[in-house]
Amino acid sequence: MLCGADRRPRFSRGWVRGFGGRGVARTVAGPRIARVFAARRIPRVFAGPDASQRGQASVEFVALLPLIVLALFAGWQFLLAGDALWNARAAARAAARAQAVGGDPREAARDHLPAPLERGLRVTAGADGDVRVSVRIPAVIRALDVGRVAATGHFERQGP
């Protein structure tokens, strides 16, 4: 393949097998080797993509990068919501046990929550032994308000 004003052969990057039993770099090959390759009709085994498609994978990656980041943020937010629900259930059980023996359900719930969830804690104790614990879901992006999750625990009153 000839190119440019001086009409020198241009070679794509890569290695070609079959010339003298060893690999020959096409980028360093001169016109003499080009004639030998043309005469022997050695196939381009590791020839790169066509010049019109060079960089296509990079363009596609850059175009999809915001979507990939958004999917990662959404997945992480989903995990945070599940963790908040799991911790709210544990805190509700602890608060119901504390209320059943005459303790403070709010303190028991606070003791069973990690520090980031304590800030949005709401505890509602009922007369029948039900305790409802609600916590705010931590957001991946702090400017967003994702919402709350709630759980209810129940223990019958213990003792006289």
Image: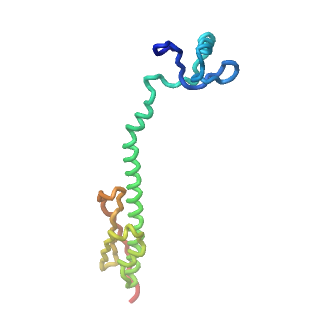
> How was this image coloured?
rainbow
Among the 4 quarters of the image, the one containing residue 119:
bottom left
Badge count = 0
Residue 144: give x, y in percent of width and height.
30, 57
- The quarter of the picture where the C terminus appears is bottom left
Residue furthest to the bottom in view is 160
Q: Residue furthest right?
A: 21
Residue sitting nearer the eye, 47 or 70: 47
Residue farthest top in this picture = 39
* Residue 42, placed above or below residue 78: above
Residue drawn at x 41%, y 78% is: 97
Q: Quadrant of residue 42?
A: top right
Above or below, 158 against 45 in this view is below
**Residue 44 image position (x, y, % from top left):** 57, 20
The residue at the point 61 percent across, 22 percent down is 16
* Above or below, 86 relative to 54: below
Is 63 situated above or below 15?
below
Q: Nearer the viewer, residue 57 or 124?
A: 57
Camera-side residue of 149 and 96: 149
Question: Residue 141, how many percent across, how many down?
Answer: 34, 56
In percent of the image, x 41 and y 62: which residue is there?
83
Say left or right for 41 vs 146: right
